[in-house]
């Protein structure tokens, strides 16, 4: 008789009414940001009178102790690692962003404290002011005991390879906590052909945005400065694992001919040593098997992407996934415990 394997879902979206209200203002503002499409659809949508409708993401996001926990109980999800959902606080001005990130962190910490075996949390911060962000990151780990950090890709079109953000990377490395980079819509300078056919979204644009962010960090030599920094990316590594051979080959050749910055190590080594990935929103056994074999099972974590992705199929997927017992324990909880400093049971 085998006992049930602990299931820790590692990229689970959540929000608070105060952030939702501010995003509703964004939905009605003149911004041309590509995120507006999604923000409008979620935060300024007509009220769903059917109750907890499948596409009523807002009620799913705001909830923790109701339907979310009920589904976790029903489907055997032991714990969710929750984080403020995309675009986080990054569309707000610096002061509002900082204030709301701190408020969200306080609330998230309270939930984790109330349900220490059911919820863990990734802290938000306002990247606009990197030094203040670093102080909030310290508070989030040292005082609130949160488990890591969440950033939603670019901030006003700027990416973490920019040295202005390095106090954030320095803090994460010093605190020994992972930064999860979740997508938001592509920046104003990147959005052109992603504006049609729903391509701004999780269908395509999100992966292109975060894949680009990850490659900028590797090719920009960020990990030469922060060799112990860990970055987590979801959605099966936003396709980077499948591109890695080519990224590595082309970057090393470009470095030789002077078309890319010199880095101490190769792109393949950075991705192997400085990244972990989750399968959030990708329930394809071939893609998961490839990713495990490519990166090593220690670098791959299970996730649902609740409430954007229904929980039951995500649980059924991982339970049916053909793998060894050791792989299953690593995917389902062991890696999450290590990466996010969650107490083992
Ligand atoms: C995701 C999907 C995130 C959707 C979203 O965020 C929206 C995701 C703000 O897969 O991470 C969506 O609408 O499907
Ligand atoms: Mn997601």
Image (cartoon, grey):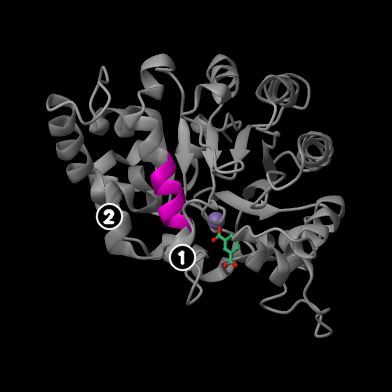
Give the alpha-carbon distance from disc 1 to disc 2, as whole Å. Answer: 29 Å
Q: What x and y, as percent, mark residue 145?
A: 72, 26
The residue at 48%/77% (across/down) is: 197
Q: What x and y, as percent, mark residue 257?
A: 12, 28
Quadrant where the image shows the C terminus: top right
Secondary structure beneath label 2: helix
Q: Which residue is mark 2?
A: 289
**Left/right of residue 73 with respect to residue 250 in the rendered view:** right
Quadrant where the image shows the N terminus: bottom left
- 28 shown above or below 10: below
Residue 264 in sight: yes
Q: What x and y, as percent, mark residue 236?
A: 39, 53
The residue at 35%/31% (across/down) is: 218
Magenta-drawn stretch, dominant element (helix, strand or loop): helix
Residue 194's mark?
Answer: 1
- 132 shown above or below 328: above
Secondary structure beneath label 1: helix
């Amino acid at each position: 008789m085998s006992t049930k394997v602990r299931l820790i879902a590692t990229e689970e979206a959540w929000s608070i009414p105060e952030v939702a209200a501010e995003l509703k203002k964004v939905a009605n503002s003149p911004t041309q940001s590509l995120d507006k499409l999604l923000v409008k659809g979620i935060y300024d949508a007509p009220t769903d009178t059917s109750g907890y409708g499948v596409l009523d993401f807002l009620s799913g996001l705001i909830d923790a102790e109701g339907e979310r926990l009920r589904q976790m109980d029903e489907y055997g999800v032991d714990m969710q690692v929750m984080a403020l959902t995309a675009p986080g606080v990054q569309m707000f001005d610096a002061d509002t962003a900082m204030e709301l990130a701190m408020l969200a962190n306080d609330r998230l910490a309270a939930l984790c404290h109330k349900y220490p075996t059911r919820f863990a949390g990734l802290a938000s911060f306002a990247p606009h002011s990197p030094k203040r962000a670093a102080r909030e990151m310290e508070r989030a780990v040292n005082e609130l005991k949160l488990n890591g950090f969440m950033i939603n890709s670019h901030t006003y079109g700027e990416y973490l390879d920019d040295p202005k953000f390095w106090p954030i990377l320095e803090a994460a490395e010093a605190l020994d906590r992972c930064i999860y980079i979740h997508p938001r819509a592509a920046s104003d300078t990147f959005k052109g052909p992603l504006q049609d056919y729903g391509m701004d979204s999780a269908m395509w644009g999100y992966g292109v945005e975060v894949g680009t962010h990850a490659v900028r960090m590797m090719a920009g030599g960020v990990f030469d400065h922060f060799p112990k920094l860990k970055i987590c990316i979801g959605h099966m590594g936003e396709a980077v694992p499948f591109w890695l051979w080519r990224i590595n080959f082309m970057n090393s050749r470009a470095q030789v001919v002077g078309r890319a910055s010199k880095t101490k190590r190769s792109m393949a080594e950075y991705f192997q040593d400085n990244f972990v990935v989750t399968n959030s929103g990708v329930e394809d056994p071939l893609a998961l098997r490839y990713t495990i074999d490519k990166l090593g099972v220690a670098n791959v974590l299970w996730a649902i992407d609740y409430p954007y992705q229904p929980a039951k199929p995500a649980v059924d997927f991982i339970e049916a996934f053909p793998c060894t017992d050791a792989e299953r324990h690593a995917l389902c909880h062991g890696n999450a415990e290590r990466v996010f400093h969650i107490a083992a049971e």
